[in-house]
Image (cartoon, rainbow, N blue to C red):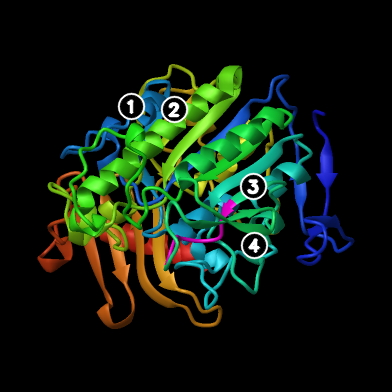
Amino acid sequence: MAGLRVERAWTRSSLAGSVMTPTTPPAVALFVLAGFSLAQDNILILLADDMGVDNVGVYAEGGTPPATPTIDALAQTGVLFRNAWSNPLCSPTRATIQTGRYGFRTGIGHLVTNNSQPLAFDEVTLPEMLDAGETGYAHAAFGKWHLGNDDVGGPLAANLAGYGHFVGTEENFVGAYGYYHWPKIENGFESISAQYATSDNIDEAAAWMDVAPEPWLCYIAFNAPHNPLHWPPKYLHSVDLPDVDDPRRSPNSFFRAACESMDAEILRLFTLMGDKYDRTNIFFIGDNGTPHDVTVPPFDPDHAKLTPYEGGINVPFIVSGPAVVQPGRESDALISTADVYMTVAGLAGMSSLPLQNPVDSVSLVPYLDDPDQESIRSTVFSEFFFPDLDNPTIVWRMIRDNRYKLIVRGGQQAGRELYDLQDDPFERKNLMDEPMTPDQMAAFLYLSQELVDLLATG
């Protein structure tokens, strides 16, 4: 298949129609494929909900994290990235993973609800990219989708986004729903499940892997450890939970139990995979930082999820598997959750992507292949805004280089903050509050211009 050029246009018909159908309009997708390797490996993406670096043992960022031996072991067989950025909350991060594009391009800057912008049908998602490139990858998604709404996709949102199989939930567990009583969707059909949701994610994914032709892409987006706080099955964790009538009376204990239970269920999945595990490249990623009510010292609850600070956007990001040369490494390279997109393309043997949509993704394959690879990105970007296609309300935009970080606030709190992450990793000293050194001023001007230049490409 070396040198094969494939041109294909796709559209989605309707909720009742097929997931993808050929159409005639030009310039929807253009792929140029290099040769595939003889053995294309499977790709597994594990996405934790609300689990920052402070809750993953191998990151050793301080405090006493939950026991996460399975995730820690992935780092020993892979590459751990220290400087991975997400968005401050989940839907925007999920959109970057699925499209390789920042929120100012997709319109997703906040939670996707019935009153906000969902993932648009003209975005080329991970499974659509693999299909249009004729890579031969089967694909499925499990767990929380949170990129559709009642008007766009509804219970078929993940399928209409290209996934051949989906079992999970549309959004968070809210109202009467929880981890033991939740709306389970399977390819558009909804029922109420009484099984522990984290365990169900693993059961469904493992069952699909048993019958799916290889190679495959499997995306598992856990609800865990996102609230509601709850009592996970005792056999899945080591936390001595207090005898309380409401988990919110002891949030840290129940949050830790949810983290440990997810880690234990990931181990069960790896066991069920059998020899497929050795043929699978695995991502473990957090969608945003830890919530403030379960953030403990030395971390600042005011710098947690839903904030522009490192506690809100610096997330665990580990890649493990046969693509990794000299495993057990760490990288200080600047990376983004958007980089999953181009990395999947590279692991699948593709050399370029659809040309109609600008992509912000950078392949991480060079880091997996070369222990001496320096940072490809000179800066990395994140944002948080309330979507309005004509006039979005900008709350924060963040950009950093290998040392300094600039936060630009919009709206009523308009202003700028500059931090030296090398000397001040907890962002306690805003350098804009006092006269800056020449180096600090140079960093401020550089990051300001980089931000202007980036946004001008939208």
Which of pointers 1 and 2 lies earlier in the amino acid sequence?
Answer: 1
Labels 4 & 3 near each other (Cβ < 8 A): no
Left or right: 233 with respect to 147?
left
Residue 220 appears at what percent x and percent y? 53, 43
Viewer-proximal residue among 152 and 100: 152
Labels 1 & 2 near each other (Cβ < 8 A): yes
Within 10 Å of disc 3 (Cα), the crowding (few <14, some 14-19, many 20+) is many
Under circle 1, the secondary element is helix
The number of numbered badges drawn on the structure is 4
Q: Where is 453 relative to 7, above or below?
A: below
Magenta stretch: dominant secondary structure: loop
Give the Cα separation between the discs numbered 3 and 2: 25 Å
Q: What residue appears at the point 43 percent right and 65 percent down from the top-left corner?
A: 174
Q: Which residue is mark 2?
A: 267
Q: What residue appears at the point 10 percent right and 66 percent down from the top-left corner?
A: 434
Labels 4 & 2 near each other (Cβ < 8 A): no
Q: Is residue 323 visible?
A: no
Which of pointers 1 and 3 lies earlier in the amino acid sequence?
Answer: 1
Please state which amino acid type lies under the numbered disc 3: Leu
Rendered image: mark on residue 155: 4
Please state which amino acid type lies under the numbered disc 4: Pro
Magenta-colored stretch includes residue 446: no
Which corner quadrant holds the N terminus? top right
Q: Which residue is mark 3?
A: 126
Under circle 2, the secondary element is helix
Residue 194 appears at what percent x and percent y? 50, 50
Give the Cα separation between the discs numbered 1 and 4: 35 Å
